[in-house]
Amino acid sequence: MLAKFFRLSASEPAKSIYSVHSPASSQLIWDITKTLPIPAWESNQPAIKDDKKAELHLYWTQAASTWLDHLSKAFDAPLQIYESEDFFLLSALQQRPSEVLLEYAQKAKKRNLATLDAIASDEGYGKHIICVLHNEDDYYRYVSEYYPQNGEFAFSGGMFIQQGYGHFVFSQGGMDSMEPTLVHELAHALLSHLPIPAWVNEGLAVNTERRWAPRPPQYKPQEIAYMHTKFWNSETMQEFWSGKSYLRPDEGNTLSYDLAQRMIARIGQDHAALVNFVNAAEDEDSGHQAALDHLGLPLNEIVSEVIGAKFDLPNPKDWDAGKEKGWF
């Protein structure tokens, strides 16, 4: 998995018009194991020195442009490419909704960086990419290129794919559904430089989403509290610490997001402590040592505070199925 190639913070001046994009013509090496046109990013590294930041930014922007030009023609219904200061949008939407989405994306990036100050980073090369596909069939056809064929996975309407050139992908929907998902997934993109565990990654993303694009609650407070009481035990809590509970197709998926959000909200009551904790947290121990060092209490005590039950600390020896980093 490569590092993300997002645009540099200091780049070209802002464009006042959200334009229909004219693709570049970079030569790319394609991944022949994929059924859709996806570059073999490891084989497309430029012969440009690391200190040539403007050249690297231009190279990856042109590479992204060429990729999207090919991808736009790969589905039954063609897609249009739009461009703004910091984003490419491969879109099934009409032109005006596409422009509105790009305007919202520009605002969301600034808000997320401010909300996650001293944690998030937009350092990197190339423009952010948003793909809005026509329907769920196209969406799942596309995201399946990045997931194994076997296994159970929770449904989604959008995600940040942190493979190769990191990018956002959505199934077409109304703005009221795409906006919170974009805020959430953009938070993941801006956190992708950190080796944080899944629960920290998702907790930060959900809290950022709730601040800038809140959705109506799915359950009443007493309902979600009862669900937590019934679901969590010593086994499922280790799934939470490893991140595997987010992949469950049952209520464990919803409860994982809710628990992580509550824990980050609790830690975030002291913003300086939150910043220190997140920047030190590692997925190897689910942030256990960072909590001791920077919060002065173990993680299972935070769980006890937010859902009223105390479970075992993270135990990586019990994570037979491995661990996850987030971006589900």
Image (spheres, rainbow, N blue to C red):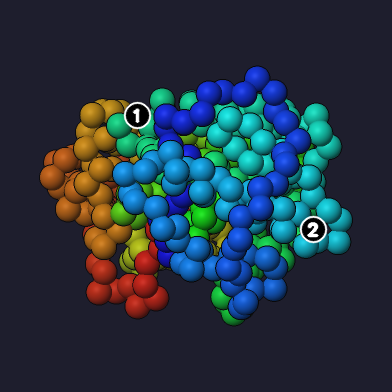
136 sits to left or right of 309: right
Q: Residue at x 21, y 54 (%)?
A: 288
79 sits to left or right of 322: right
How far apart in space, not on screen, are marks 1 and 2 (Cα)? 39 Å
Residue 317 location (% of width, % of height): 25, 74
Task: State the residue position of label 2.
Answer: 73
What number is the disc on residue 117? 1
Q: Residue at x 41, y 58 (%)?
A: 47
Whether residue 52 is visible here, answered yes or no, is: yes
The quadrant in which residue 181 appears is top right
Please, is residue 206 above or below residue 162 in the view?
A: above
Please, is residue 309 above or below residue 318 in the view?
A: above
Please, is residue 70 above or below residue 50 in the view?
A: below
Residue 282 location (% of width, % of height): 26, 55
Dot 2 amino acid type: Lys
Q: Nearer the viewer, residue 231 or 159?
A: 159
Name, please, the residue furthest toward the right. Answer: 77
